[in-house]
Image (cartoon, helix red, strand yellow):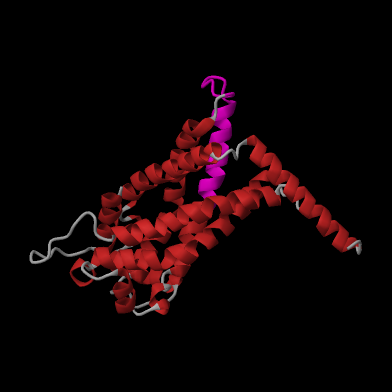
Amino acid sequence: MLPLDVLKTRRQTKTPTNPSFPTSPWDGALPTILGYTYYGLSVYPTYNLLIRVLSHPPFHTPPELSSLLAGSAAAVVACVGLAPMEVIRIRTVAEPWVYKDLSLPEKASLIGGLGPLYKGFAPLLVRQVCFGTVKFAAFDYLLASILESEALGWTERGGWEASLIAGVGAGLIGAVVSQPADAVLTWLAGRDCRSTTILAAARELVSRRGWGSLGEGGGERLAWAGFIIGAQFAAYDAARGAMGAGEEGIRQAVNAANAASEVVKLVGQGGV
């Protein structure tokens, strides 16, 4: 799916053709892979851990609110590692004749170090919080609907197949909601942007390229998000099952959460 992501970014940055330096559909592959590997390894365990903590004593948070809070927090954790990789990826795709033949540390140095690498953190955070909260909430709703549907006959089946279908739907919904923030992120991370804040960058983008610029690359992003998020949910569910973290794992996590809550109560009552 990397070529789709490259095409989306080129649409957003209006990358000019350079006959002396042909572009590739695999430009920016390394930072993309590294960024979303970190994303996948951090966001799903964080989300599941927080869901279990929030839904049990002493919090007893309603399921819908638990999903939104856990999704937002998981997105923040993911953005810490994803933000610099996204800036490097965008620059590599937008200006391959400058960045393509450089190593990852050389690209980071040329961009300017930590400050410029985290320049797009705010729009990335908005994008990922919108995408993450909507994605997880939609996934929980769709998965429950699939498993409870008598017409589908998957009440007792479940498994990674149901997670795949729910994940694809969740990815599509999340991509639609977060598309404007993605366009602003690409603009803010590029060389042409003169703004330093997310609101100023959004105004600059719209004033220079029109309101339609907020939807640039949306089709490619829908296809990319549906495939990637569906695959991530299915892979995580399959891996969790293979490692024995099904119902028994959930029971153990609940027991641990209950034990922790008892400690909190004792401390609050002066019992420890």
The majority secondary structure of the magenta stretch comes to: helix
Whether residue 263 is situated above or below residue 251 in the rendered picture? below
Quadrant of residue 110 within the rendered picture: bottom left
Say above or below: 256 vs 79: above
Magenta-highlighted residues: 133-156
For the C terminus, the quadrant is bottom right
On the picture, is 93 further left or further right than 228? left
Residue 130: % across, % down? 50, 55
In front here: 272 or 16? 272
> In the rendered structure, does residue 140 fall within the stretch colored magenta?
yes
Horizontal side of residue 199 vs 149, given as left or right: left
**Can residue 4 be spotted in the picture?**
yes
Residue reaching furthest to the left: 20
Q: Which residue in the rendered view is the most extreme toward the front?
A: 243
In the rendered structure, the answer to whether residue 137 lies left or right of residue 207 reads: right
Residue drawn 49% across and 53% down? 41
Between residues 53 and 247, which one lies in front from this camera angle? 247
Question: What residue is shown at x 29% (from left), y 51% (from top)?
Answer: 2
Q: Write the residue at 86% across / 62% down.
A: 268
**Where's residue 175, x and y in %?**
42, 49
Q: Where is residue 269 in the image (x, y as percent from the top left)?
A: 91, 61
Q: Is residue 60 visible?
A: no
Image position, residue 123 (x, y; %): 45, 65
**Residue 6 on the magenta segment:** no
Name which residue lies at 46% across and 34% down.
165
The residue nearer to you, when weighing 199 against 166, is 166
> How many circles with numbers are drawn on the protein?
0
